[in-house]
Amino acid sequence: MTATERIKALFYEISKPLMLLLLSGVFVVVGYGVAQAAAVSTTALGLLASLASLIAGVLLGFLFGNPRRIEGEAQQKPGYAVNTNLEQVSDWLTKAILGIGLVELGKLGTGFGDLSRTLGAALGGGGIGVAVAGAIIAFFVPLGFLGGYLWARTFFTGVVADLDVIVGMRVALYALRENSQLKMSAVAEAVQKDATEDGQVLENREPLLNVPTPVIEQVSDLSTLWREIEAVLVGLVGSVGAEVRGTDGIITILQRRGVLDDAAVSALRQLLEASRELSGGAVLSEEDSAAVRVVGGDTLAALARLRRFAPAAFEQHVLGQLRIGATLGWEIRFDGQLPSRDHRSFRIDAVVTRDRRRAGVEVKAQGANTSASWNNLLEWLARVPEDVPVLLVVPDGAASVRALAAAQGLEELQVLEWDTESDQLVGRVQEMLGLDAT
């Protein structure tokens, strides 16, 4: 049994005599009121004074028993901080009450006597009325104080602690690991299917990257895990436009590129929120802490292995959106052929035909981010057909690709930046086919 549980059990035991005392006090007040000439008004006033004294005592007990948050280095990190106004007010009022009480200690007896005489006059007057009024205050205020203090130190402290416990982190962790593994399997299966379609190897597909398999050691805590996840996400996205800010923006870009599925995005955002809550003073349950140690490394490794499949996933996603957006009358041939400027076969990701008009769609997941991808892009541009409009889809960096295409005189080539213009895919193809984009 924990300390908190023992205190709660003690509170249950103490609450029994407290309730007995409370009922006894009410019974005495009612008995006194009934014995007076104005029984109804005196009884009602006596009960009201008892309730007011009890509430005043409860509030005072709550102020003294209100739990205080333990501050540490974690609270200095960026994130959402817990609002501690109630704690600060409680601390300030407690000190003010003690300070004023000590300074005005000599006047407390006078004040108590004045209040008793004023209330006693309404309770029948005379010495008995004053004595009853003083007894009500002296009885119900300490009783309320004791009850409020014990409640604040037990149940309210437990509620505050429960609110600080991060919820859903463990489920998100397992979901992210499972979804990352499913994504890798789906992309690899699609690549393998494309490679054997119609018994021939499809020549124009984004390859799986030859990147080393990450070696992930056991992760000890959520903060460390999230820092490692952020580094992996940066590697997955490669590069993004200047308008993208923060981890949440990178997650959105990866979702838009089809590298992360909705389930993985949801899990990542739950973990992001959990890390922010942790920075704001929240705590992990023992079960969630154990989950981080047990599957945190595996989850991180599964996410990191997506780097190998990211280009292929992006290409599959774009071509899938083209297939979904195809309008009536379109005929799409994936891994089609167009006449090249050097009179050789020119493979392209998709050839869209309608009413004898053709347009090509090519996806370059690597864009022009590295020297190797830049050379590949130069070689590809040198063979782009002159008489067939082609749409080149890159994840980002479209401005530099457009400049390069213009320098080579490729007037029929259009460049679409997926991160910012993904909603224009179908409309651009319609325009190249000579159709109204609306």
Image (tube, helix red, strand yellow):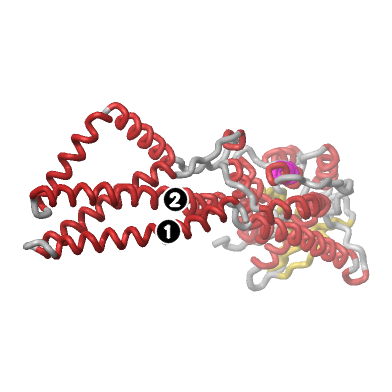
The Cα atoms of the two marked residues, 2 and 1, are separated by 9 Å
> Which stretch is magenta?
226-232
Mark identifier at residue 150: 2
| Residue 373 in sight here | yes
Residue type, numbered disc 1: Ser
Q: Quadrant of residue 202?
A: bottom right
At a point 8% along the width and 49% down the height, the residue shown is 126
Residue type, numbered disc 2: Leu
Task: Tell me, yes or no, whether the highlighted magenta stretch contains residue 260.
Answer: no
- Position of 426 with respect to 110 (left or right) is right
**Residue 224, percent from left and from top:** 72, 42
At a point 80% along the width and 61% down the height, the residue shown is 187
Mark 2, secondary structure of its residue? helix
As rendered, which of 276 and 186 lies closer to the eye? 276
- Position of 41 with respect to 373 (left or right) is left
As rendered, which of 238 and 39 lies closer to the eye? 39
* Few, some or many residues within 10 Å of mark 2 (<14, 14–19, 20+): many
As rendered, which of 174 and 166 lies closer to the eye? 166
**Residue 98, percent from left and from top:** 35, 33
- Position of 55 with respect to 274 (left or right) is left
**Residue 416, percent from left and from top:** 67, 50
At a point 50% along the width and 43% down the height, the residue shown is 82
Q: Is residue 191 placed above or below 112 in the rendered structure?
A: below
Mark 2 and 1 residues: CB-CB less than 8 Å, in contact? Answer: yes
